[in-house]
Amino acid sequence: MAEQTIDVRRVAGSLGAEIFGVDLSRDLTNQTYDEIHEAFLDHQVLFIRDQNLTPPQQAAFARRFGPLNEYPFVKGLEDAPEIIEIVKEPDETINFGGVWHSDTTYLDNPPLGTALYALEVPAAGGDTMYANMYDAYDTLSDGMKHMLAPLTGVSSAALRRSGGRAKGIGKTSTMTPLNMDKAETITAEHPVIRTHPETGRKALYVNSAHTVCFKGMTEEESKPLIEYLCNHAVRPEFTCRFKWEIGTLAIWDNRCVQHFAINDYHGERRRMHRATIVGDRPH
Ligand code: SIN
């Protein structure tokens, strides 16, 4: 194999790495893509600073990982319909994604990954946190792993405890809401423990934004265990926290990562472009 073209530097003990030496606006060689993909599988979330990307260029990079999804609840951009703009205006108080979650687990095929690109960021704050769901699974007791192994989680688009999608969109934000009346009906069932299709590792796949209950159990019966698992999943030692700069692109693996957009920058504007990559049906 030719000499490595990218430089990979870990940002925390559990997950996350910064990548240096790549210009994502260009067509990546297969070798560079393979190195990025390997780092993606090894570190679960990658941060690539100092990029200058149009929406079609961002979409082209994300498409190296697979075809792109259209997000069900926000209209995409004119020149790249698979990309949505995530905006919080200075006069808004609710943000998008301000709760621990893996993206759109209420879809039968939730996204493999998400590529998020920063266009405007507050002077301080607006960081995003990430948590490693392999570590969340690996650190459960054998008894808990055994109990969870046969369970199926039910995710609903209507739960969305973050409130951002339900209440914030269409108020002062430029995010154009779509299909909000359908949220109640969009649900999916997925294993509570999923096996990553590329690494073969097991990951906890329950999140507080979308997982409503376990299949065959009531919400009331399910709640204590869902809450326990969601709290366990985001123990500080399983996380990293990233401070954005304009021009940073992050790409994370939704199959083994949860994320949380911190809402601590009221009075300032934050604007991002987000593309999601089609995933397989979890098993
Ligand atoms: C998201 O949940 O996809 C948004 C994350 C962020 O804005 O940091």
Image (spheres, grey):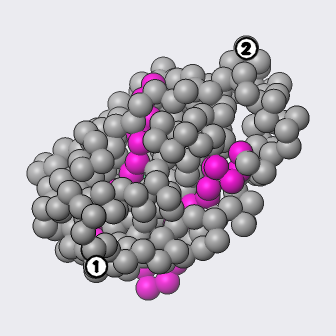
Q: Nearer the viewer, residue 182 or 21?
A: 21
Name the mark on residue 256: none
Which residue is located at x 85 percent, y 38 percent? 142
Q: Is residue 156 left or right of residue 146?
A: left
- Amino acid found under the numbered disc labelled 2: Gly
Q: What is the three-letter code of the residue carrying label 1? A: Gly
- Judge whether residue 163 can be spotted in this image: no
Q: CA distance from mark 1 to mark 2?
A: 50 Å
Query: In the displayed structure, does residue 22 sit left or right of residue 260?
Result: left
Classify mark 1: residues with Cα within 10 Å, few (<14), some (14-19) or many (20+): few
Q: Along the horizontal axis of the image, is 212 left or right of 182?
A: right
Locate residue 93, reporting x and y percent: 52, 63
Out of 81 and 40, give the one closest to the viewer.
40
Q: Percent x, y for residue 140?
A: 80, 45
- Judged left or right of residue 138, residue 74 is left
Mark number, residue 21: 1
Image: magenta residue range: 108-137
Q: Residues within 10 Å of mark 2 (few under 14, many from 20)?
A: few
Q: Is residue 111 magenta?
A: yes
Q: Which residue is mark 2?
A: 216
**Mark 1 and 2 residues: CB-CB less than 8 Å, in contact?**
no
State the quadrant of the N terminus: bottom left
Q: Which residue shows up at 34% across the image and 46% down it?
A: 276
Regarding mark 1 in the picture, which secondary structure is present there?
A: loop
Instruction: Give the mark toward the camera: 1 or 2.
Output: 1
Q: Identify the residue at image location x=72%, y=22%.
A: 150
- Residue 119, image x, y percentages: 29, 71
Q: Secondary structure at mark 2?
A: loop
